[in-house]
Image: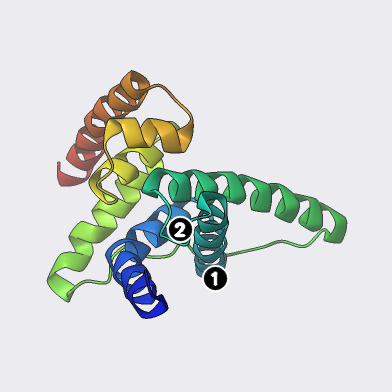
Amino acid sequence: MDESSAQAQWRMWLDDHASRFLLFARQKARSEADAQDLVQEAVLEAAQHSGNGMPPPLPAVYATIHRRAIDWARAEDRRQGRELAAHDDAPQAWFDTTIEERERAHCVQNAMSRLPEIYREVVTLKIWAGLTFAEIGDALCIPTNTAASRYRYGLEQLRNLTREVVI
């Protein structure tokens, strides 16, 4: 494959998946800038591990984002402990929508933030990233059936959380 077609394939792959990677990273990161950095590093690391010059498998990128976010959080906690500084970041919006949809987006964002992380990450990977349960299992290092169960329980909790807002 020549260099220009490889670059075109990478561009198309990034166009298709970058926003989903960023959405997942936002849940893990403490700021928008950290989420963007996580995505960049995860794509590069996953591509280096695949070693063939082609875009890496999606579960590998999500797994790398997940792993890197844990490492970043630990490093940040250690740094904060050393500096005794408060770090106050407002949560980032998950949607950039019209005025009419902002209230609904806020409701979903609020409900998602109240889900336990084990459900939130599976719901995000299934709905917004479009991964299969097998791919989610690979990305999070859990069995496929566990991914499916967490998805089902997560949706059930989301329904209950959004009902609370509507009532």
The image shows residue 54, relative to residue 156, as above or below, that is below
Residue occupying the far front of the picture: 1
The image shows residue 106, relative to residue 127, as above or below, that is below
Residue 117 visible? The answer is: no
Q: Position of residue 135 (x, y in %)?
A: 34, 36
Q: Secondary structure at mark 1?
A: helix
The residue shown at (43%, 65%) is 92
The residue shown at (21%, 42%) is 162
Residue at which label 2 appears: 26
Q: Secondary structure at mark 2?
A: helix
Q: Position of residue 164 (x, y in %)?
A: 22, 39
Q: Residues within 10 Å of mark 2 (few under 14, many from 20)?
A: many
In the rendered view, does 124 fall on the left or right side of 71? Answer: left
Three-letter amino acid code of the residue under disc 1 = Ala
Residue 144 visible? The answer is: yes
The count of marks equals 2
The answer to which quarter of the image holds residue 106 is bottom left
Residue at which label 1 appears: 33
The residue shown at (37%, 65%) is 18
Asked whether the beta carbons under mark 2 and mark 1 sit within 8 Å of each other, the answer is: no
Distance of label 2 from label 1 (alpha carbons): 9 Å
In this orientation, which residue lies closer to the viewer: 166 or 138? 138
In this orientation, which residue lies closer to the viewer: 6 or 64? 6
In the rendered view, does 46 fall on the left or right side of 136? Answer: right
Three-letter amino acid code of the residue under disc 2 = Arg
